[in-house]
Image: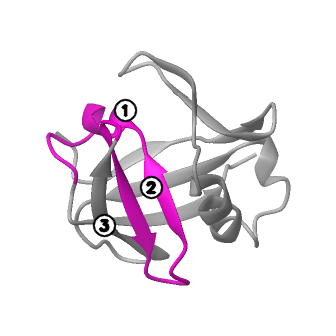
Amino acid sequence: MNSIMVINPYWYVGTWVFDDDATGLVREPFVSGMPEIINGLVEGISDARAGFRLLFSATPFPGYQASLTRDRADFGGTWYRSDRDGAEGWLCPALFKYFPEAPAKIYVKAEPLEK
């Protein structure tokens, strides 16, 4: 298992989604507060809706942009609270394709895709 994972979210029918061939996920949507958290992460990325790189890890890494703290389990997924602004978002059970259990913290960084 990698220490730092990467996905390339993009905007599709009104929300952020991502594909991941390694896990079989296709247009997996971010819902319930996560789109708003992602909007804050990509504020400085021009044309982010066309796609951007999202790095994430259960451990801090150099240059991480924000961290999310686990709050509670619900509907098979996990609620997290942004340490930047207190916003709350739910990560669905697809989280367990990347982690064996919901991490206490998730560290994230949004970067533009290289052209």
Tell me: residue 66, above or below residue 45: below
Asked whether 107 or 70 is in front, the reply is 70
Tell me: residue 96, above or below residue 66: above
Position in image of residue 24 (x %, y %): 41, 15
The residue wearing badge 3 is: 71
Q: Is mark 1 on a helix, strand or loop?
A: helix
Looking at the rendered image, the disc whose residue lies closer to the viewer, 3 or 1, is 3
Q: Give whichever of discs 3 and 2 has the lower sequence position.
A: 2
Image-based side of 16 in relation to 82, left or right: right
Residue lying farthest right?
Answer: 47
Q: Is mark 2 on a helix, strand or loop?
A: strand
The residue wearing badge 2 is: 55
Q: Give amino acid for label 3.
A: Asp
Position in image of residue 111 (x %, y %): 61, 61
Position in image of residue 11 (x %, y %): 76, 40
Asked whether 72 or 22 is in front, the reply is 72
Which residues lie in the magenta part?
Answer: 75-102
Asked whether 97 or 34 is in front, the reply is 34
Disc 3 crowd rating (10 Å Cα; few below 14, some 14-19, many 20+) is some
Q: How far separated are the C-alphas under marks 3 and 1?
A: 17 Å
Q: Report if the CB atoms under discs 3 and 1 are less than 8 Å apart.
A: no
The residue wearing badge 1 is: 94
Quarter of the image containing the C terminus?
Answer: top right
Residue 97 falls in image quadrant: top left
